[in-house]
């Protein structure tokens, strides 16, 4: 578990130093996986139409509801690794 946590933290740090900015869909995926790994399932009300960014983030996070913390971390790490290539 400690190794996974360390790898996750390294991937989070690496995400800030990517050579290219990922497309918006990939950024939403990274956001959702990060939030799922660190905070668990999404809670609260879906933002309204006036908050398009908040709504997109909420929807991306809600789409992976039920994903375990370890699985979310592994998927985040794998996504960052694929972006570094």
Image (cartoon, grey):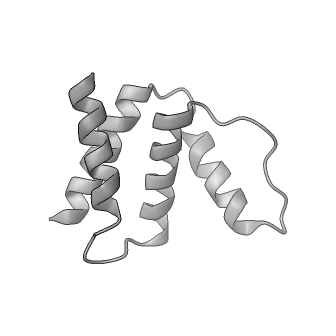
Q: Residue furthest bottom?
A: 20
Q: Residue at x 65, y 37 (%)?
A: 42
Whether residue 36 is situated above or below residue 70 in the rendered picture:
below
Q: Residue furthest left?
A: 85
Does residue 67 appear left or right of residue 2 in this picture?
Answer: right
The location of residue 8, given as percent across then percent down, is 30, 41
The answer to which quarter of the image holds residue 52 is bottom right
Whether residue 36 is situated above or below residue 83 in the rendered picture:
above
Q: Nearer the viewer, residue 6 or 45?
A: 6
Does residue 78 appear left or right of residue 67 in this picture?
Answer: left
The location of residue 33, given as percent across then percent down, is 45, 44
The location of residue 50, given as percent across then percent down, is 84, 69
Whether residue 59 is situated above or below residue 63 in the rendered picture:
below
The answer to which quarter of the image holds residue 61 is top right
Q: Residue furthest top?
A: 1
Give the quadrant of the N terminus.
top left
User: How many marks are shown on the rendered structure?
Assistant: 0
Whether residue 62 is situated above or below residue 85 in the rendered picture:
above
Give the quadrant of the C terminus.
bottom left
Does residue 35 appear left or right of residue 81 in this picture?
Answer: right
Q: Nearer the viewer, residue 77 or 59?
A: 77
Q: Residue at x 40, y 35 (%)?
A: 72
Q: Residue at x 21, y 29 (%)?
A: 3
Q: Residue at x 60, y 31 (%)?
A: 41
The location of residue 26, given as percent across then percent down, is 42, 62
């Amino acid at each position: 578990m400690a190794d996974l946590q360390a790898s996750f933290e390294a991937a989070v740090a690496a995400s800030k130093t990517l050579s290219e900015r990922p497309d918006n869909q990939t950024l939403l995926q990274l956001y959702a996986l990060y939030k799922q790994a660190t905070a668990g399932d999404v809670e609260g009300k879906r933002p309204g139409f006036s908050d398009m960014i908040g709504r997109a983030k909420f929807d991306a996070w809600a789409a992976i509801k039920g994903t375990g913390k370890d699985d979310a971390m592994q998927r985040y790490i794998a996504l960052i690794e694929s972006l570094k290539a």
